[in-house]
Amino acid sequence: MAWAGKILRVDLTKGTVTPEPLKMDWARDYVGSRGLGSKYLVEEVDAKVDPLSPQNKLIWATGPLTGTMASTGGRYTVITKGPLTGAIACSNSGGYWGAELKMAGWDMIIFEGKSPKPVYLYINDDTAELRDAGHLWGQSVWYTEEALKKAHQDPLLRISSIGQAGENQVLFAAVVNDLHRAAGRSGVGAVAGSKNLKAIAVRGTKGVGNIRDPKAFMQVTFEKKKILHDNAVTGQGLPTYGTQVLMNVINEMGALPTRNHKDVQFEGAKDISAEAMATPRKTDGKKHLVTNQACFGCTIACGRISKMDEGHFTIENKPQYRGANGGLEYEAAWALGAANGVNDLEALQYANLLCNEYGMDPISFGATVGAVMELYEMGVLKKEQLGIEAPFGSAKALAHFAEITARGEGFGKEIGQGSKRLTAKYGHPDLSMSVKGQEFPAYDGRGIQGIGLAYATSNRGACHLRGYTVASEVLGIPVKTDPLESEGKPELVKAFQDATAAFDSSGLCIFTTFAWSLPDLAPQLQAACDDAYTVEELSKIGERIWNMEREFNNRAGMTPKDDQLPKRLLTEAAKTGPAKGKVNELAKMLPKYYEVRGWDKEGRPTAETKKRLGL
């Protein structure tokens, strides 16, 4: 049935590791990964819990297609109540770790309580035990991976860990695996740090052999891989340029948030784009981009491997950053670049490497720096506080802030609290470009109306991956809609959000949806798991997951006030580009969205909606 049928429950307070059977009725109703892990969380954790207290739980979850031969079957999610937002947090990662856990025979790991001292969990197939991590505490993700592989004399060990940012409880700390793949958003790494949990090291040799109909599964996954191969985005654009293919496209549309969303186009976009990464540098004649890279079982290979200019000021005396390493994705390049007005590609990559090494979300980090630079230009923050001159466009300030935030030094401690808390402290809360405390990704809601509504209503705070209407509004997938038009966007956002929840829960990557839709996912789940996973059923499951997450947030105390965008997007019109003169029309879209969701005016699912979804 493609599930391993087993979970591990780890009580960090007592130091016990206990196997349990997976609740198969929940698995059928919520599939796996995001959906199933969230079901366990909402059933076991009080929504009002302090996210950094021992009473919160932290869950690593795979999906039924994780570790199988389905394309992109390497995904896993980390689920908890998020410290950045106070909302449900569910952060997705690729690489090889998720498949390894599944091949060891486990669907999920639930951590509860708090360890009295730093520990890591070691798993080798059926063997699972907590071990001392005192020697790893205070060390980076990169050091931790290498040290654990050496200690266990196993180069094929897969590690999911936190760096110093998680230990210091930076509120946007990430969980990182395979050196540069990350469950990056909402501060899941800070929750691990609060529990004294440094890492999970996994070796799985069993494989995933319990497929319901292996012949049918081989046939259907082969057919679906061909669709990915033949598609212009998944077969050409992403393998060649990665997600960075979007930088110039979104800039030309007038939807590239620039200088903390003061502008919607960045004059330096071309300098930090995919094309720039693939062009030989003037300084040393070498290209920034070395090659692309795939996660487990992926036929797209959108990942970037880059090599910095060895003469760049950021790494003059730092040989450890000179090798080939994880390169910039679009969101990171935007957050570290356009969001701060910085067009120095090498400085962006240096900050990106620090985010990987120390375990931080580059989106929230970069967007918070954008707010800091605006406060500096307003004269609210001074050089003496920051340790450096910090106008928009300063690559030196960006590098400095990355270093002190990663290490938890000086003003870096304040940056590590995120833009919502920082801007409020200095009297300008409207300068935080966030929803529910989580910073925006790389699309401006004035130039792309639907994504503005998706940010406002996302259950985990501002997020593009919870309902990527950019596919429709910009790329015409599956149908083209006008990005400047708010009419019809509530229905579009709901459809994207529900379908995404189903894909996330399967264990596959959301990037497949540039070429696939639910009719492509359904037969793969049917062959692997159960005939019941029809297109209609998956759509309903996605909607059930969305409403379950919403109910958790409502119980946590969230209201329609938390479904709002910053004043800047609602009152300051775009200055240039196709969206010139436009603001986001959230006030028009939000009531209609509640209506199509089957919620009341307070954003609560009605009794009828809950009954229909079996909640």
Image (spheres, rainbow, N blue to C red):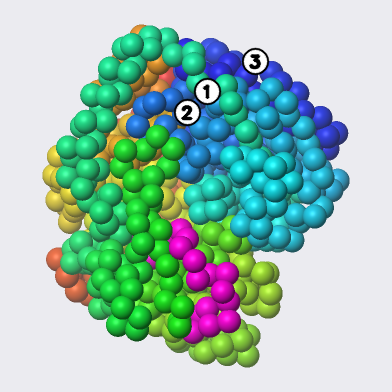
When the figure is inspected, residue 446 is found, relative to residue 102, above or below; the finding is below
What residue did someone put label 1 on?
A: 207
Q: Which residue is tagged 2?
A: 67
* Residue receiving disc 3: 21
Which residues are the magenta region? 313-334
Task: Give the label on residue 11, or none.
Answer: none
Residue sitting at x 22%, y 43%: 235
In this view of the protein, which residue sits in the foreground, 238 or 427? 238
Q: Where does the image place residue 162, in percent across and percent down from the top left?
A: 64, 52
User: Marks 3/1: CA distance?
Assistant: 18 Å
Residue at (34, 64) in percent of width and height: 289
Question: Is there a contact, CB below 8 Å, between mark 2 and mark 3?
Answer: no
Question: Residue at point 31% right, 54% down?
Answer: 242
Q: What's the amino acid at mark 1?
A: Gly
Q: Label 1 near label 2: C-beta < 8 Å? A: yes
Secondary structure under badge 3?
A: strand
Rendered image quadrant of residue 445: bottom left
Nearest to N terminus: mark 2 or mark 3: 3
Q: Amino acid at mark 3?
A: Pro
Report, in whole angstroms, how far the alpha carbon at label 2 lies from the one at label 1: 7 Å
**Picture quadrant of residue 413:** bottom right
Q: Residue 510: where, in percent of width, then height? A: 35, 39
Magenta span has 36?
no
Mark closer to the chain start, 2 or 1: 2
